[in-house]
Image (cartoon, rainbow, N blue to C red):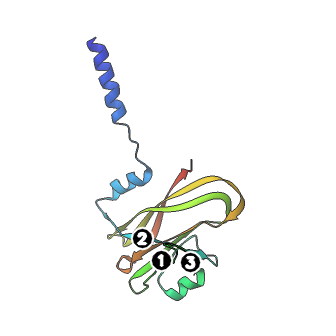
Amino acid sequence: MKKNILFVLAIGFLCSCQDKSTPIENAKVIHKSIEEAVDFRTAQRYFLKADLPTSNFKIKTESEFTSYFQPAAVMGKDGMPTPIDFSKEMVIALSLPETAVATEIEVKAITQNKEKNSLVVYYDLIVGDKMSYTIKPVTIVLVDLVHDAEVTYVQHEVKKD
């Protein structure tokens, strides 16, 4: 009887020690001591009117932003594009090549490494089903200009249910 109880307790302990965290969560823990979280917000109601020079791009002026993006207002509550104050904020745009697969980019966290003067953008790439049309996935996030630095990206791919 004692052996059975010890066996059940050992199995329970081993199962509770299993690491179920994602690579993004692991990266946050590893870099926590040298990186600090950066506040950001996602800009809504803009569409890409011209291809970005690279798939991930930092924009610091309104004229450069308007050369790539156009507002896309719609009726109803929250229908206006997110206002951007380029005197205080910069844009980090993440885009992917055209695809016929339902694809979303969701920024989960941004951290700043003061030692390396760099920003790290952690994002989920959410992949769904094949579609009968193509899209060009893009996400725009706004970050305070005081965090202007070289940007690197950490992607975590997620299959959509």
Q: Secondary structure at mark 1?
A: loop
> Does residue 149 show up?
no
Q: Residue at image x 58%, y 70%?
A: 55
Spatial distance from mark 2 to mark 3, Cα to Cα?
A: 18 Å
Q: Residue at image x 30%, y 24%?
A: 9
Residue 39 screen position, x and y as percent? 36, 69
Residue 117 screen position, x and y as percent? 36, 73
The answer to which of marks 2 and 3 sits earlier in the sequence is 2
Q: Quarter of the image containing the N terminus?
A: top left
Q: Sort mark 3 into few (<14), some (14-19) or many (20+) by Cα contacts within 10 Å.
A: some
Q: Residue at image x 56%, y 60%?
A: 104
Q: Residue furthest top?
A: 1
Amino acid on which disc 2 is placed: Arg
Looking at the picture, does residue 2 appear above or below residue 101? above
Residue underneath mark 3: 73
Amino acid on which disc 3 is placed: Ala
Residue underneath mark 1: 82
> Does residue 62 show up?
yes
Q: Secondary structure at mark 2?
A: strand
**Discs 1/3, front:** 3
Q: Sort mark 2 into few (<14), some (14-19) or many (20+) by Cα contacts within 10 Å.
A: few
The answer to which of marks 1 and 3 sits earlier in the sequence is 3
Q: Residue furthest front?
A: 76
Amino acid on which disc 1 is placed: Thr
Q: Secondary structure at mark 3?
A: loop
Would residue 145 appear left or right of 80 to someone viewing this image? left
**Discs 1/2, front:** 1
Q: Which mark is residue 55?
A: none
The answer to the question of whether label 1 and label 2 lie on touching residues, with beta carbons closer than 8 A, is yes
Residue underneath mark 2: 41
Residue 147 screen position, x and y as percent? 36, 76
Spatial distance from mark 1 to mark 3, Cα to Cα?
A: 10 Å
